[in-house]
Amino acid sequence: MPTRYLLVALTFCLSLLLYIDRACISVAKDDVMTEFGLTSGQWGWAMAIFTLGYALAQTPTGTLADRSGPRIMLSVVVFLWSVLTVVTGAVTNFISLMIARFVFGAAEAGAFPGLARATLNWYPVSERGLVTGINFSASRLGAALAMPLMTALIAWQGWRNAFYILGGMGIVFAVAWFFSFRDDPTEHPLVSDEERDYIVANRQKVSTNVDDIIPFSKIISSRSVWLAMVQYFCSNFTFFFCLTWLFPWLKDTYNLTSVNASLLCSLPFIGGAIGNWSSGWLVDFLFVRRGIIFSRRVPAIIGFSLAAVGLYLSLQMTDAISTIAFLTLAVLGADMTLSPSWSYCVDIGGKSAGAVSGTMNMAGNIGAFATAIAYPYLKSWYASPEPFFYLAAILNLVAIVCWLFIRPDRPLSGTNREGMVD
């Protein structure tokens, strides 16, 4: 078996663990709020502050991945977020919870930019979409697994010990990653000469000079990057509702037990995994047959269309199962946008794939921050969650417009007539 396939399994596990650790706080909501006497608004800020730390650290950690390589970067990232998982289980009040969540978010920030940089080094362009889809599907399966897993762990060990257990697992994985991964296939002892030559001949050609990394000033002034940032903000606005507020909202709205709510809340994440797999395959299929623009644009537009329709129809339902069915469609659609989005960042970023993808992900997690705050406040102002869902649906339509102008065939290497970098 080619070594790069084994690497996919390893990055799949990394992404799986990341989202188990990220999503587990949602299931612990009732226990934490009761112990610390928190209001819904305070809980919203505790969720949002994570995404703020995550967003702010995206570009710096992406740049570090470009300069230091994904091996060291991801080893440190996994170790730090695992330590912060343990720290979350040891917090004693609202302030310490806020601090722990903010640092937790910052610690996780380098994960996906680091994976983007590993994808650039290890995979032919024709395999990029599916590899990205597989990695992101793991994050959705991790979130799905976190719901029943954390419910069972909390019932068995209490919410604090549940965090300690998950953190310990992550520390072990960080050590395993460091000893089993290499920054480039030419450095890995298990890669055959045949596989090495195939990867080198078919991967994206970029400069090997670290001084050629694109400066952040050029990245942030690029229209191409801004289009990516806006559409990714819209995508995360939809998805992060499921990661932060879906469990308590569904449980309270339909008077479900924690077990039943956790099982139903797992379904949108499974839908997200399916969206990642199908979109990843479609990106590579269309790349071979219709070229790079079509292969990125079409899956993303299909995905945002499904997300908008799913959100709107979920509001028309009156029972938990039907509501979850359409929210699953919405998340499946939102996650169809991930493979083309991250593939696009590698397309235009090249040697600076980590920094470009990190900048896009920064905007996406500002969207996640907005979700965590917007939902409780909109619900309070309008005495209904409906305005939030309508807003999320409209943002998905905005993202479709963005994709009509996105050009993955234009790397960040020139200047257009309006003076902005293409």
Image (cartoon, rainbow, N blue to C red):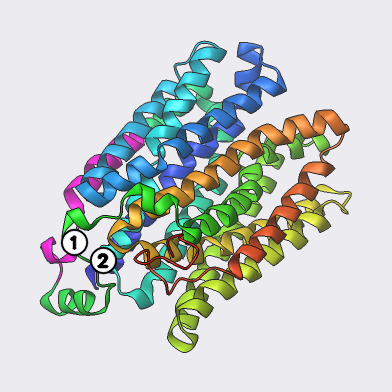
Looking at the picture, how far across and down is residue 414, in whole percent?
37, 67
Element type at marker 1? loop
Q: Residue 52: horizontal and vertical position, in percent?
A: 51, 33
User: Label 1 sits on what residue type?
Assistant: Asp
Q: Which residue is mark 2?
A: 122
Residue 404 or residue 139, whichever sits in front: 404
Report the residue at 87% width, 33% height from top.
Answer: 382
- Circle on res. 135: none
The stretch in magenta equals 168-191
Residue nearer the viewer, 265 or 149: 265
Quarter-wise, where is residue 384 in the image? Answer: top right
Taking the image as shown, residue 122 lies to the left or right of residue 335, namely left
205 magenta-colored: no
* Residue at point 46%, 55% (across, down): 138
Sooner in the amino-acid sequence: mark 1 or mark 2: 2
Residue sitting farthest toward the bottom:
289
As shown in the figure, which amino acid type bears the numbered disc 2? Trp
Q: Main secondary structure of the magenta part?
A: helix
Q: Residue at x 44, y 48 (%)?
A: 359
Q: Which residue is label 1 attached to? A: 184
Residue drawn at point x = 52 percent, y = 58 percent: 228
Q: Is residue 181 magenta?
A: yes
